[in-house]
Image: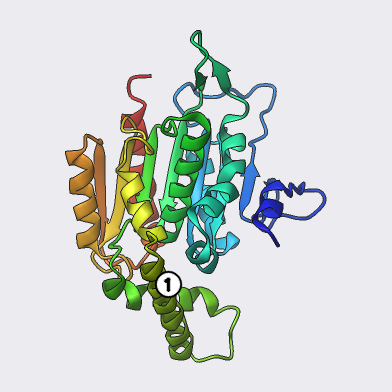
């Protein structure tokens, strides 16, 4: 199936049930939208997010991401929620242009038709949304970076948002350092589809694929999706510097190392981003909410309050 078909094929919830569960509308096979029903007596908080944009980790299943949706709905019951599924294999072989095109429905879902013309004829956007973005693992970061690129191409400025949650990301982009963790993550994602294959065989196949992909990129001089995404998050032309961000990580993560996250934090602070950090004890990769839900959602609520404190 072509990328254009994936972008243009809008399938309603009634036509085909969403794997994200009741209430979600399928925008593409990767992107799902939930709009909270409002009763005649309900009202939106002037400081709560109007939209929550959630990028899952590589090959995360909808039932796992649904737990994060439940957490956000408990905190912010009137917010619109956009969930992005992030398949590892597709992300790695797609070009930046293809990834960006696949993410364009997010812009319509979050912002609608907000482009206006200024007095001098230039394009701008008029946006009253309060957007909270959550990115999980490096694969989620790659698709978030593609969204930033798509928005920049359309509106010629950084995607506006109030808060960015970085859960177990970003890590190093060195191939030699990451061949083991990345192939392990791919093998974990593929295990449900290859139940009869030993895990080590699956990981070895993933490692060979990654090596071939890295070698091809080196030959043609192409920047990797990981390198682009890690740099994009600290580039104010793509990722708004006014947004507050929260890094959530642990020393026990064996896929994204805590030292790499703290290097990214230091760079973000140096470039003027407002940063909060929350380190979790004894939690694996993207396992912080599962093992410490109280600490997790308290950190999200606290940083959001600081992000919108002036509203």
The count of marks equals 1
Q: Nearer the viewer, residue 142 or 254?
A: 142
Q: Residue at x 56, y 54 (%)?
A: 98
Q: Nearer the viewer, residue 8 or 288?
A: 8
Could you say where residue 153 lies in the image, as x and y percent from the top left?
49, 36
- Residue indicated by mark 1: 216
Quadrant of res 117: top right
Which residue sits at x=44%, y=73%? 213
- Horizontal and vertical percent for residue 218? 36, 69
Disc 1 on helix, strand or loop?
Answer: helix
Q: Where is residue 115 drawn, in percent x and y? A: 57, 23
Task: Residue at 48%, 10% (x, y): give it.
Answer: 120
Residue 187 to residue 14: above or below: below
Viewer-side residue, 42 vs 57: 57
Q: Residue at x 55, y 65 (%)?
A: 90
In which quadrant of the rendered image does the C terminus lie? top left
| 211 relative to 280, above or below | below
Q: Quadrant of residue 204?
A: bottom left
As displayed, is residue 255 above or below residue 118?
A: below
- Residue 228 spot, x, y in % from top left: 37, 53
């Amino acid at each position: 199936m072509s990328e254009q078909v994936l972008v243009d094929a809008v399938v309603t919830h009634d036509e085909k049930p969403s794997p994200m569960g009741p209430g979600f509308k399928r925008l593409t096979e990767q992107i799902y939208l939930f709009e909270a029903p409002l009763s005649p007596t309900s009202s939106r908080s002037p400081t709560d997010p109007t939209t929550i944009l959630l990028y899952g980790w590589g090959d995360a299943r909808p039932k796992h991401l649904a737990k994060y949706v439940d957490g956000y709905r408990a905190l912010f019951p009137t917010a619109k929620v956009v969930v992005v599924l992030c398949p590892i294999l597709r992300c790695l072989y797609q070009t930046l242009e293809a990834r960006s095109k696949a993410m364009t429905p997010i812009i319509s879902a979050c912002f609608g038709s907000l482009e206006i013309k200024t007095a001098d004829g230039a394009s701008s956007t008029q946006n009253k949304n309060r957007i909270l973005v959550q990115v999980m693992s490096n694969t989620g970061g790659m698709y978030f970076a593609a969204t930033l690129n798509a928005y920049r191409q359309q509106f010629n400025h950084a995607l506006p948002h109030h808060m960015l949650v970085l859960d177990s990301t970003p890590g190093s982009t060195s191939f030699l350092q990451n061949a083991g963790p990345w192939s392990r993550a791919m093998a974990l994602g593929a295990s449900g589809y290859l139940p009869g294959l030993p895990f080590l065989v699956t990981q070895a196949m993933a490692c060979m694929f990654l090596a071939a992909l890295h070698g091809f990129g080196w030959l043609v001089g192409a920047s990797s999706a990981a390198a682009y995404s890690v740099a994009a998050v600290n580039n104010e032309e793509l990722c708004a510097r006014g947004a507050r961000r929260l890094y959530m990580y642990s020393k026990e993560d064996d896929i994204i190392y805590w030292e790499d996250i703290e290097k990214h934090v230091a760079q973000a602070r140096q470039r003027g981003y407002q940063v909060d950090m929350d380190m979790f004890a004894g939690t694996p990769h993207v396992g912080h909410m599962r093992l410490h839900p109280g600490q997790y959602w308290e950190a999200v609520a606290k940083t959001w309050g600081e992000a919108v404190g002036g509203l």
